[in-house]
Image: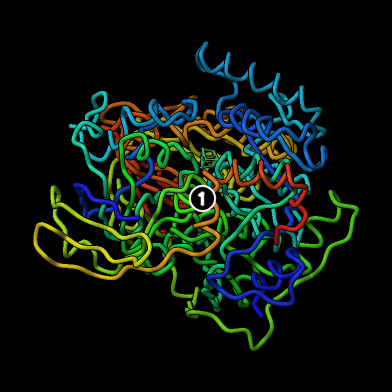
Amino acid sequence: MTITEKIMAYNSGRDKVTPGELVWTDVFSVMTMDYLGKETFKMFDSLGTGDVFDKSRVICVSDHLVPPPTPQFATMLNEWRAAVKAHDIQYFYDLGRQGIAHQIMVEQGHVLPGKISVGTDSHANTYGAVGAMGNAVAVSDAAVAMATGKCWFRVPEQVKFYVTGTWQPWVMAKDLSLHIMGMMRWNGHLIYKTLEFAGPAIDALGMAGRMTLCNMTVDLGAKNGIIAPDQTTIDFLRPVQKGNWDMIASDADASYEAIYEIDITNLGPTVSRPDKLDDVVPVEMVVGTKFNKAFVGTCTNGRLEDIAMVAKILEGQQVHPDVNFLLVPASTQIMKDAIKAGYISTLLDAGVAVDTPSCSACAGIHTGVAGDGDVVLSAGNRNMKGRMGSKNAAIYLTSPAVVAASALKGEIVDPRR
Amino acid sequence: MIIRGKAWTSREYVMSFDMVVQRFWTSPIDKTENAKFIMAGVDAKYDQENAFKDEGYTFIVAAHNFAGGGKSIEHCVTGLMGAGIQVVFADSFARLQFRNAINYGLPFVTAKNVIDMVETGDELEYNLETCELKNLTNGQSMMTAPVAPFVAEVAAAGGLMDFIRQKIKDGTVGELR
Ligand code: SF4
């Protein structure tokens, strides 16, 4: 069996499951956040069970709307806080302790290998980085999971990416995500499937890179992404999780719908061009493209390793005068670590604006939205028209390394040169 | 049950964030409300109150990755239902909205190359039991994928919330597996 089939079988009291089958499984944790949270609790209340299934396993996070940019959002946040309070939720990461929900879920140990967690935001598949099954659901599903500790799932078909070779300098997990997007496109090959990442080049990745890879599987159209837990996972989780977990992995003879082998040695920095995520090219093809906004942050690339990469490239240099560079750490913990490591002062010296952790410009809701005519070079995850604000802005997606190196010149460059 | 009506079609990706544009992502879930600006980002002519609904479609016929783009908001499904859509056919569906459709009892039916036999405005007839889809305008027909028993059960209960309410009432939630 594959890791996914084992997780789904163990958590639904079965010996095995088959792709295509619909099963109800136990859910380890449920995440909801500011802009859908009130609606989720309202739905939950309508089920009439009273308390949530486990007050320490319903995790609430303020991320999309903090700090609030409009009176309307401020009011929405107040209603959300009241709902969280009314349900006596043990883990509430509100402004001051905030971060992007998916980062918080992994970083604070609210997801575990071999378990199933759901969240009311699409990038809940980030949890696959620790060998958990992370699934995005809508508010009805979350409400049902909060009431019953259960959720229904269709057992997905599974596709394996076996990644070998050596990561080249300045090439990051994000480049692999975008490369896979370009390779598979949105024409049905990955839709609804689980993407399992394995092989020596995946083993070599730290938790930040693993999170990026699993995070973007939703943007590839997949159900989720997963990486079997190993020593890296244990070292990462030990400080935040005292409990035990199962080190579930796929059997050597497990069968997949397809297996794709990728040799990372040949992979260079990669860019997705504006409007369609699957319009992916090697950086060489867009070198020289001028832009006026640079953004590093989000649940895809707002981690310490990403900030470290940006600081290393910008150290002792100045961001081009025509570029506004905004960097937003994915959580308060990352912000603290980045300050301790000296990255934040390096960034400020270089002319980068650093904002308090949140989704920030990613969803075009607050802090740093794009206006008419803006060309944004972003380390985020989505680049459809209007994603970051104006429909008349263009968004190029790439890795933090490409964003940083390019920001020095005001046009896209290959960080290897 | 046999459903008859007019189809709206698209060969392009119909993305969730275009079905429900950003200014409505935080709206309360309500079929009538969510229907008002459904498809507003798919075609600018639908960015007017009830513009899509007023065209009176019963079916949507699409190609790959219908309602893709990864938004989890169920407004896409409630909006379509509020606009009178009763069945959506496509080569493939994005999983989040496929889930939502099941949870609300709106059939999302997988039908390979269905887009090749329907044009916008065609009159269709779909038999939910036999899974046969007929295009009354051009005389073509095809068989679609059947609906899973669980999906039918949820739809019969009036959607996931009512399905679960009943289980809670019966004390049988623990038996779900
Ligand atoms: S950072 Fe962007 S993609 Fe991630 S949860 Fe926030 S808005 Fe969504």
Q: Residue at x 65, y 74 (%)?
A: A17
| Furthest-bottom residue in this view | A253
Is residue A230 rendered to the left or right of residue B12? Answer: right
| Furthest-right residue in this view | A242
Can residue A118 be seen?
Answer: yes
- Residue nearest the observer in this picture, A103 or B135: B135
In percent of width and height, residue A274 lies at 30, 46
Can residue A404 be seen?
Answer: no
Q: Is residue A312 above or below residue A264?
A: above
Mark 1 CB near ligand 1 (8 Å cut) = no
> In the picture, which quadrant includes the C terminus of chain B?
bottom right
Q: Amino acid at mark 1?
A: Ala
**Local crowd at mark 1 within 10 Å, few (<14), some, or many (≥20)?**
few
User: Helix or strand or loop: what does disc 1 sit on?
Assistant: helix
Q: Is residue A61 above or below residue B102?
A: above
Q: Is residue B125 above or below residue B51?
A: below
> In the picture, which quadrant includes the N terminus of chain B?
bottom left
Q: Which residue is mark 1?
A: B156
Q: Residue at x 61, y 70 (%)?
A: A202
| Furthest-top residue in this view | A71
Mark 1 belongs to chain: B
Is residue A407 rendered to the left or right of residue A79? Answer: left
- Residue nearest the observer in this picture, A177 or A57: A57
In percent of width and height, residue B90 lies at 31, 59
- Residue nearest the observer in this picture, B81 or A91: B81
Q: Is residue A336 above or below residue B172?
A: above
- Residue nearest the observer in this picture, A61 or A353: A61
| Furthest-left residue in this view | B138
In percent of width and height, residue B77 lies at 41, 42
